[in-house]
Amino acid sequence: MSSAPRLGHANLGLGVGLRTTHYPHILEKWPAVDWFEIISENYMDSGGRPRYVLDQIAERYPIVMHGVSMSIGSTDPLDVEYLRKLKKLADDVNAGWVSDHVCWTGVTSKNSHDLLPMPYTEEALRHVVDRIRTVSEVLERPLVLENPSSYVTFAESTMPEWEFVRRMAEESDCGLLVDVNNVYVSAFNHDFDPFEYLRALPMDRVVQFHLAGHTHCGTHIVDTHDGRVIDPVWDLYKLAHELTGGASTLLEWDADIPPFEEVHSEVLKAKTVIDGDGPLPETRVAADDVEFAEEAIPHPAAFVTAEAE
Amino acid sequence: MTADGSPSATDLHRLQRWMLSVVTHPSGVEAGIEDEATRRITDVTTDRIEEVVGRSKALDSVSRLQVYANAYFVRLLECLREEFVALHTILGQETFDAFAFQYLQADPPHSYTLGELGANFPRFLRENQPAEDLAADVPTWSHLLIDLARLERLYSEIFDGPGTENGTPLRPDDLQSIPTEAWPGCRLKPVPCLRLETFDFPVHVYRTAVTRGEEPTPPSPELTHLVLTRREFVVRRTALPVDEFEMLGALVDGATVGEAVGRWASQSELPDHELAPRIRTMFAGWAAANYFASVELP
């Protein structure tokens, strides 16, 4: 099965993940950002300020929805109510596309609120492909799925992750969100070549890229979204850009979030890669400069606290 | 290695049940692997863990599972600390985490949204209240903790729930335009975010002080009747005297203005000539605070 580049989606340029701490800046300055990505779950149940802010931003910027709770790989039934709310929000904010992760978040009705890894087996592949088709029908748009960072591999896996992702995308006709940082993180954690991973993906299905920082613990890397993008991840991004001819690119920064301009300037460094002829950014972080952390916690989901007088 | 015998238990389903059981075990990964219930799903011991989870060049299989296990409780505890910030402050982190840790085991997350994580925390605290406190004549420390948890959960629900910001709640001028003879038969419909709750302590004052970065002393018992609502996307709370609180409650429950006012007036100690001005002041104040969405004329 073939498809138009990016499944026909536009290349939106360089975007930033919308976070509550940046609301005041955005509403006051209306910064020149190409587009915003939202965490779907932070808005689909909001009848208050988050949704009010989103509606204003959606009037001025392209919005893309990125979820953490679809649990496409779980053996629990799909949450129909969740999908209904997701579709309504996508319709309301005219979302460019709706994405989530190649993962499961829970089973037997218990939710870990984490992005748990799939075993890469034929059974798991059939299961995920069937569910992607169902979800795409409910959402009335192709689903876009992201490769997750992972910290374990399963003995029963019969294929590498990149083969699973490629076959999943082709057999279900879904789009791909390639998180370049996740490729780097998982490659380190599972001892594979991240460049081989990227070259194996069906690049005409790549709708979007993610960039982010991570935390290196020496023996493993955790996807913490709490810092700058390091050099080897930019190198992977450069290859991904060359292989795809370019796709919408977004920076995620979810912990120790700096002022908006700093987050925005980090993603704008991608221009150097996209333009192809400029010097590398001086503020890039080399892999050798990374200090090892004792421990780190991945935070795939954001929690929004109530404002009260 | 054997499955649990369930005819519908596919390899994928079994692996997911096993992993979730291991990484959410309260005593850690190794205890999770060895747990009898986990071994009924997949009968593998720690020394044979590589039959299920592979190792990397730098990290053994158990340590890799611990990345998920470490994150599970830490992430959820962080969310509960943020939602119940005043309860966290009054207890201190160690004690708060102990309560929250027990709560997460008794009532693990089921919803797709972290917004529901703390929904049953007040009930959990109430159900585990010391027996001697339940029989106490005066509100105790545990009553204070439950009050704080109730209040903070209400804040979350009101913050995320439907509000008045996109509508046109009833204003004082709207009330004044109602013909005098129609007043007794009117019913006032509350805005969707209006809640009336009674507490044994003035926990709203304590909570506000905490969020302002102050270091308040724990409040003493004081029966507190709060009206909670939301304006401009911020949760608002107002303490009312009991007679006003009860009259407002009667209106919210569907009583006509005549019924609610009559009940209040019959119990009021105000002289007759002060009743009408007092009623006007109350209703104007409630309308100014956006408590009512509309009026139903008789």
Image: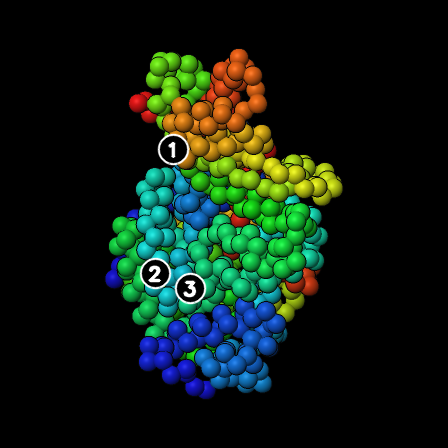
Residue at image position (56%, 32%) is B242
Chain letter for mark 1, please.
B
Q: Which amino acid type is shown beneath numbered disc 2?
A: Leu
Measured in 3D between alpha carbons, the distance from the residue under mark 2 to the one under mark 3, in whole angstroms, is 11 Å
| Quadrant of image for the N terminus of chain A | bottom left
Pointer 2 and pointer 3 on the same chain? yes
Residue A209: image location, x then y, percent? 45, 52
**Pointer 2 and pointer 3: residues touching (CB < 8 Å)?**
no
What is the crowding at mark 1: few (fewer than 14 residues within 10 Å), some, or many (at least 20)?
some
Q: Quadrant of the C terminus of chain A?
A: top right
Q: Which residue is mark 1?
A: B254
Element marked by disc 3: loop
Give the answer, above or below, for where A9 lies relative to B72. Answer: above
Can you identify the residue that label 2 sits on? Answer: A78
Q: Residue at x 60, y 77 (%)?
A: B30
Secondary structure, mark 1, is loop
The residue labelled by disc 3 is A109
For the residue pair B53 and B23, the one nearer the viewer reads as: B23
In this rendering, would B105 be left or right of B250?
Answer: right
Label 2, label 1: how many angstroms apart (C-alpha)? 40 Å
Q: Dividing the picture into quarters, in which one does residue B206 lie? A: top right
